[in-house]
Amino acid sequence: MAETPLYQLRFPTGDDTPNVPRDLFNLAADVESKLGALWATVNALPTSITDANAASAVKIRTNATQSIPTSPVNGSGTAVWYPVTFAAANALWETSWFNATYPSRITPNVAGIYTVCVGVEWNIASNNTAATRGLRVTVNGTVFGGQSMLPGVSGDYTPEFQTLTCAVAVNGSSDYIQAEVTQCSGVSVTLNPTQTLGSMSAVWNGHL
């Protein structure tokens, strides 16, 4: 029996003769075989493709002020970093990655590389001393995505915005992402609960 070149199924071509049971049986068997091969190919696709539907993004935000104690002044000791506390996950994004028990963390459930964006607003009215203020991203408490250091300007009482964007890698189970801040003014400084700057997001980019 000749095969149709385009589909490689055993079926009469160039022949108007009525199909006989043997032709239909061959066609059905070939269709089943080809679909089985296609399904095997889909199952063998890299997880970086199939996980794309499961992975998404998360954004958490603050809703209250947070007092950040001072680190040693003017480099007189090791800087102390404090996790930024968040309140809730954006309902339009992935919400299961945020647990109120650990309000400073994002814990993605899909392994891979993530782009992390974090922003804070320092309330300089609470202390406008010319002191360095820092923001960094950590994975499991260890610096992973670099940090941003911002010098304060004495006499300027306007809010001071600080942002950082970086890439991190997590295992999709126990690894957590955290934003941390530090400041060395000599007294506590407040973070404002702004909806736009007081937030952290993590967007899945793919597997390692």
Image (spheres, rainbow, N blue to C red):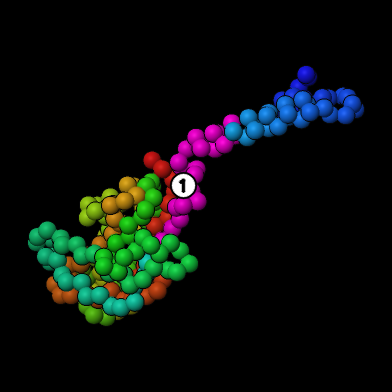
91 horizontally vs 159: left or right = right
Q: Which residues are magenta?
A: 37-59
Q: Residue at x 49, y 44 (%)?
A: 50
Q: Quadrant of residue 69?
A: bottom left
Find residue 203 and report its horizontal and vertical position in percent: 43, 55
Observer-nearest of 66 and 163: 66
Q: Camera-side residue: 26 or 85?
A: 26
Question: What residue is shown at x 12% (from left), y 58% (from top)?
Answer: 78
Q: Is residue 50 above or below residue 184?
A: above
Residue type of the residue flagged with mark 1: Asp
Q: Is residue 171 above or below residue 66?
A: above
Residue 53 drawn in magenta = yes
Q: Residue at x 46, y 47 (%)?
A: 51
Front-most of residues 127 and 67: 67
Q: Residues within 10 Å of mark 1 (few under 14, many from 20)?
A: some
Please state, as top left, top right, bottom left or bottom right, where the N terminus lies in the image: top right
> Residue most toward the top?
1
Q: Residue at x 54, y 34 (%)?
A: 40
Q: Position of residue 19 (x, y in %)?
A: 84, 29
Which quadrant holds the C terminus? top left
Q: Which x, y percent locates residue 93?
A: 46, 63
Q: Is residue 119 left or right of residue 8?
A: left
Residue 22 highlighted magenta (yes or no)? no
Residue annotated with mark 1? 51
